[in-house]
Image (cartoon, grey):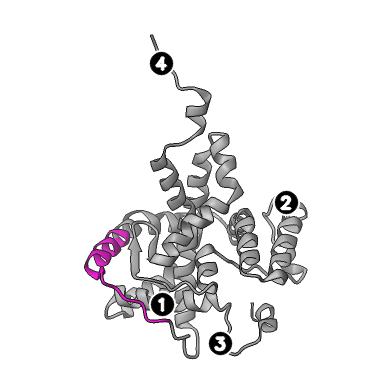
Amino acid sequence: METRGTPQSRRLPSPLARLCLAALLAASLAGLAGCAAQQQASAPGSPPQQEEVSDPLEEFNRAVFQLNELLDIILLRPLSEVYRAILPDPVRDSVRNFLRNLGAPVVFFNDVLQGRGERAQITFGRFLVNTTLGVGGLFDVAKDMGAPYHGEDFGQTLGVWGVKPGIYLVLPILGPSTARDAAGRVGDVLMNPLTYVYSANDLEYLSVAFGAGGAVDLRSRNIELIDQLKRDALDYYILMRSIYLQIRENEIRNGLTPGDSPERRLAIE
């Protein structure tokens, strides 16, 4: 007799599947932090000083780093080149806008958890405006109305709460991280309403598609910059570690230096 799973068993993914889902949903966020860090490092002026973070797992981290580099060479970079070649800039901008709009609830919850009410209002307003007037988030109408995008994640929230970064980690596929940021990735998945929508409707593949699309879009925007960093770096692993830690510290402070008033945050972004 053929045995079929019950509706409940089909709707609830295994713990391993949930873990993989968490990782895939976080992929775009990891890439965003890394590439934003590169842009910060190449910008004029002195970069912000990051908090000292230990790297006791450096040998293991370097091995994972090399694996990620191999995946980038054979898969992500070629896909990014094709993506950029066949899609014009406005279409790629719409892809980014759509994915950012999907992530707005997570940004909103982290704004609230950080006690930044004004930023939470902006995030909520952006979501409403871009979902409606922006045709499901394809167009960033809110930016033209004076409400630019800003990102937040639970790793940043933990940092605002005073949680230390912990040890430095390089995660398979996801790239640079710390113990605090790795825990933050799980928190973001748990607070994302789409996680439960996907699970309840057997749509987990959408999270994979959106995560992969975001990674390809982001990589396509930084092809030349990353190539230059690889050429110029004496030790690419050390460079990326330093850049990642700098940008995470900058993100937690929202671009402020110690002593800046909170009222300046929105103007900076």
View extreme (left): residue: 59
Question: Sequence-wise, which precedes: disc 3 or disc 2?
Answer: 2
Circle 2 sits on which residue?
135
> Label 4, label 1: how many angstroms apart (C-alpha)?
53 Å
> Label 2, label 1: how many angstroms apart (C-alpha)?
36 Å
Q: Element at badge 2?
A: loop
Question: Sequence-wise, which precedes: disc 2 or disc 1?
Answer: 2
Circle 1 sits on which residue?
243
Q: State which quadrant residue 98 falls in.
A: bottom right
Circle 4 sits on which residue?
3
Pick the residue in front: 46 or 260: 260
Q: Nearer the viewer, mark 3 or mark 2?
A: 3
Residue segment shown in magenta: 51-69
Q: Measured from the top left, where is residue 235 in percent x and y?
A: 27, 77
Disc 2 residue crowd, few under 14, some 14–19, many 20+, Cα 10 Å:
few
**Quarter of the figure that contains the N terminus:** top left
Q: Give me the residue at 28% from left, 61% from top.
A: 64
Q: Measured from the top left, where is residue 22 in percent x and y?
A: 46, 50
The type of residue carrying mark 4 is Thr
Does the magenta-highlighted stretch encompass residue 67?
Answer: yes
> Label 3, label 1: how many angstroms apart (C-alpha)?
17 Å
> Label 3, label 2: how many angstroms apart (C-alpha)?
37 Å
Q: Main secondary structure of the magenta part?
A: helix
Q: Nearer the viewer, mark 4 or mark 1?
A: 4
**Quarter of the figure that contains the C terminus:** bottom right
Instruction: Determine whether label 4 and label 3 are within 8 Å by CB.
Output: no
For residue 257, the mark is 3
Disc 1 residue crowd, few under 14, some 14–19, many 20+, Cα 10 Å:
many
Question: Sequence-wise, which precedes: disc 4 or disc 3?
Answer: 4
